[in-house]
Image (cartoon, grey):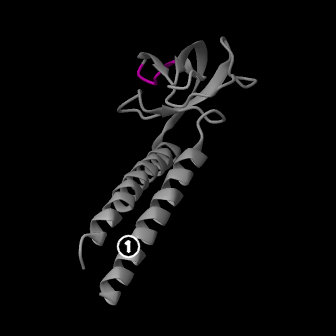
Amino acid sequence: MEREWLFLLIPVLIGVSFLCVGVYGLRRAGSLRRTGITTVGHIVRHDTRRDDEGSRYHHPVVCWTTRDGRACTHPSLFGRSTVTRGFGVGASVTVVYDERNPGRFALPGWDSKSFFVMFTAVGAALTAGASVAFLILLMTQ
């Protein structure tokens, strides 16, 4: 076996990276669903960010009060190209937050679990495919 196996490191590294991001996001979402505290918040503005191609993404900034009386204002991690109905400025929204770290929160109906499912699936496919190719390479040498 020459250096062919080095080329298999690229899809393995990309696959493992995608897999880690996907699993982390799914675990975070599951943790918030199980132990998070639900409250009502209000969207105070949208942080609009541009990507490299010039597309704009709107991240709602939500304000709410925790059970112990702390005021929290945080932008959502997820941005969308359009603001969907019910998430405009001034809208009341449901917020699920971590009591120990209120900056870790989710907006049901805005945040998308499918993003992390896609990352997990792509990462698993790349990792498994490259691993199978590596095993075949080992067996044929």
Which residue is situated farthest in the front direction here? 2
**Pick the front one: 110 or 48:** 48
**Which residue is painted at 42% across and 32% down in the image?**
104
Q: Secondary structure at mark 1?
A: helix
Decide which of 79, 128 is in the foreground and name it. 128
Q: Is residue 23 left or right of residue 134?
A: right
- Residue range (magenta): 62-68
Quadrant of the rendering where the N terminus is positioned? bottom left
Residue found 30% across the figure and 83% down from its top = 138
Residue holding disc 1: 131
22 w.r.t. 104: above or below? below
Q: Is residue 52 left or right of residue 24?
A: right
Residue 47: percent from the left, percent from the top? 53, 15
Q: Is residue 5 visible in this depiction of the protein?
A: yes
Q: Position of residue 73 (x, y in %)?
A: 47, 16
Count of labels in the image: 1
Q: Residue 62: in sight, yes or no?
A: no
Q: Pointer 1: residues within 10 angstroms few (<14), some, or many (20+)?
A: some
Counting from the top left corner in percent of width and height, residue 32 is at: 48, 42
Q: Is residue 99 magenta?
A: no
Q: Is residue 66 magenta?
A: yes
Quadrant occupied by the C terminus? bottom left
Q: Residue 21 in the image: x percent, y percent?
A: 41, 48
Which residue is the extreme one toward the right?
Answer: 85
**Residue at the (60%, 16%) spot, across then down:** 43
- Tell me: residue 86, above or below residue 90: below
Q: Amino acid at mark 1?
A: Ser
Give me the residue at 30% from left, 71% from top.
Answer: 4
